[in-house]
Image (cartoon, rainbow, N blue to C red):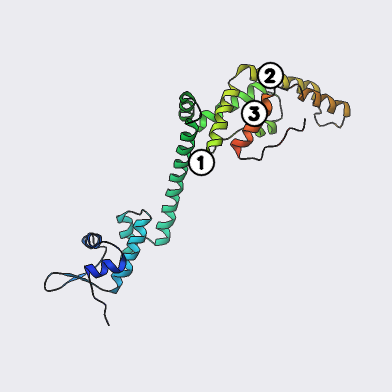
Amino acid sequence: MVMDHSIGALARIAGVSVKSVRHYSDLGLLPSRRTSAGHRRYDASAVARLRLIRTLRALDLDLPTISAVLRQERSLAEVAATHADALAIQLRTLQRQHALLTVLAQHPLEDLHLMTDQSEQDRRALITDFLDATLHGIDPAIHRNLTPVLPEDATPAQVSAWLEVTALITDESFRTSIRRLATGYLALAGDDPLRPDPEYRRSLIALRRTADPRLDRYIELVAVINGWTPLRNAG
């Protein structure tokens, strides 16, 4: 038997309002026929179409996109993948905003201005300048291990850590202390920094113990920003 639904019956079956059914029908998303009295009637396929429209609207897809799916101009899989990618970008943006607002509750507004004004390139240049100025001549691998990279979807803890790192690396006394440590290391290491010499090793440990305590904090902050498990200083 051919199913034949009134607009009210279709709305009840699909769980939407009559107004929505009428709107989708006017847009051509729900084919119908008219009775002699001018009333819309819908067949069984309209139920499935309406349920699909309701589901896609609940996922925040716009009506032109839904129309393209119903007309088979775009596949549902393609639309879902595209929408998922767009949502991922929105989620990263929302997470960043959440992180900044959380940090704002704990830091001066001036710090947040600094954070929002910095681009990724600005942050990279800031760290490169610090490492080049203080660790000149040191193994590039150490530079990489001491380079914090703030992710786009940074957590409040990572944003807070970045602000603390920024304060540290722009502190001239901290820069001077790191430069002094690096100079001492280069003098001890000479041409063979990996030589198995017990006296050399003891000298390195003694030098490390003279380091500015803020260096350990910097290393911890880099681990937080990069999402690494912080390591305790063995020295």
Q: Secondary structure at mark 2?
A: helix
Amino acid found under the numbered disc labelled 3: Tyr
Position of 153 relative to 107 (above/below): below
Residue drawn at 44 percent across, 53 percent down: 84
Q: CA distance from mark 2 to mark 1?
A: 33 Å
Residue drawn at 21 percent across, 61 percent down: 26
Q: Residues within 10 Å of mark 2 (few under 14, many from 20)?
A: some
Q: Residue 14 falls in which quadrant of the image? A: bottom left
Amino acid found under the numbered disc labelled 1: Asp
Residue receiving disc 3: 218
Position of 33 relative to 103 (above/below): below
Residue receiving disc 2: 177
Residue receiving disc 1: 153
Residue drawn at 46 percent across, 30 percent down: 116
Q: Is residue 222 left or right of residue 17?
A: right
Q: Position of residue 139 (x, y in %)?
A: 71, 30
Furthest residue in direction bottom, as rendered: 1
Mark 1 or 3 closer to N-term?
Answer: 1
Q: Secondary structure at mark 3?
A: helix
Q: CA distance from mark 2 to mark 3?
A: 13 Å
Q: Residue 56 falls in which quadrant of the image? A: bottom left
For residue 14, the mark is none
Q: Is residue 180 left or right of residue 70?
A: right
Q: Secondary structure at mark 1?
A: loop
Mark 2 or 3 closer to N-term?
Answer: 2
